[in-house]
Image (cartoon, rainbow, N blue to C red):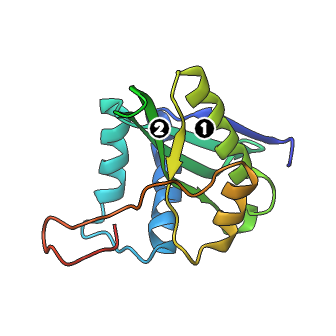
C-alpha cells in the first residue's frame, strides 16, 4: 500500500471534490442523474444531516477516492453496524492503495465506534472490488439480500 495515501473524514468544504468523485462513481455504475444538481445536493444533505460518514482518500493533497458509510443497527447483535455503501477510486489512482486505505479506515472507525461489523455489497462482476474486500477479511454473509423498488416494483438492481 502506498504510504502517501491519507484518509480523513470529509467536511462540507470538500463538497466540490466529493461531487466530482461521486459523479465518476455514478458513471462507473451506469447511473445518469435525473437532475444535474442531484449528486451535489445528495452529498450536501448527507454531510449537513450527519446521517453518513464520508471518507476522502488523498495523495499529495489531491482527492483520489471516497467512501460513504451509513451507520445503522443490527437487531440480532443489538449493536450498531456500518454499511459501506459506496467506494470509488479514480481510474488513474487505482493500484496505489487508496481503496485499501479507505476500507481499512472504515473498519478502524467502525471498531472505535463500537460497531459489531461492516457490511457491504458489490456487483458480482466487479472482481477487483471483490478481491480487495476478501483480502481485507470480508466474506459472504449467512443471509441473502433482497430488494424491491418502491416506484415500479420490478427493478431488482438496488
Q: Assign a secondary structure to mark 1.
A: helix
Q: Residue at x 80, y 62 (%)?
A: 95
Q: Nearer the viewer, residue 63 or 120?
A: 120
Where residue 141 appears, as percent x and y from the top left, is: 52, 54
Q: Is residue 41 left or right of residue 55?
A: left
**Mark 1 crowdedness (10 Å alpha carbons): few <14, some 14-19, many ≥20:** many
| Marks 2 and 1 close (CB-CB < 8 Å) | yes
Image coordinates for residue 36, horizontal then vertical, percent: 30, 65
Query: Does residue 80 lie above or below 133 as drawn?
Result: above
Instruction: Provide residue 3's location: percent of width, then percent of height.
Output: 87, 41
Query: Label 2 neighbourhood size at 10 Å, few (<14), some (14-19), many (20+)?
Result: many
* Looking at the image, residue 122 lies above or below residue 19: below
Between 16 and 154, the residue placed more toward the observer is: 154
- Residue drawn at x 52%, y 64% as measured from the top left: 122
Image-based side of 116 in relation to 137, left or right: left
Camera-nearest label, 2 or 1: 2
State the SS at label 2.
strand
User: Which numbered circle lies on residue 69?
Assistant: none
Q: How many marks?
A: 2
Task: Measure how far apart labels 2 and 1 are at the Cα level.
Answer: 9 Å
Residue 35 at what x, y percent from top left? 25, 66
For residue 155, above or below residue 138: below
Q: Which mark is residue 82?
A: 2
Please say if 21 is above or below 127: above
Seen at 38% across and 34% down, the residue is 76
Q: Earlier in the sequence, mark 2 or mark 1?
A: 2
What residue is rendered at 30% in x and 74% in y? 156
Residue identifier under label 1: 106
Q: Quadrant of the C terminus?
A: bottom left
Amino acid at each position: 500500500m502506498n504510504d502517501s495515501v491519507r484518509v480523513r473524514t470529509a467536511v462540507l468544504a470538500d463538497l466540490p471534490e466529493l461531487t466530482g468523485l461521486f459523479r465518476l462513481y455514478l458513471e462507473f455504475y451506469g447511473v445518469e442523474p435525473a437532475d444535474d444538481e442531484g449528486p451535489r445536493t445528495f452529498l450536501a444533505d448527507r454531510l449537513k444531516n450527519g446521517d453518513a460518514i464520508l471518507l476522502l482518500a488523498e495523495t499529495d493533497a489531491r482527492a483520489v477516492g471516497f467512501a460513504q458509510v451509513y451507520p445503522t443497527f443490527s437487531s440480532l447483535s443489538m449493536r450498531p453496524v456500518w454499511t459501506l455503501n459506496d467506494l470509488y477510486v479514480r481510474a488513474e489512482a487505482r493500484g496505489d492503495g487508496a481503496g485499501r486505505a479507505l476500507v481499512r479506515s472504515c473498519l478502524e472507525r467502525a471498531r472505535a465506534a463500537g460497531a459489531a461489523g461492516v457490511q457491504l455489497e458489490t456487483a458480482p462482476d466487479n472482481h477487483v472490488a471483490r478481491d480487495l474486500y476478501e483480502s481485507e477479511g470480508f466474506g459472504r454473509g449467512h443471509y441473502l439480500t433482497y430488494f424491491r423498488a418502491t416506484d415500479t416494483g420490478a427493478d431488482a438492481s438496488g
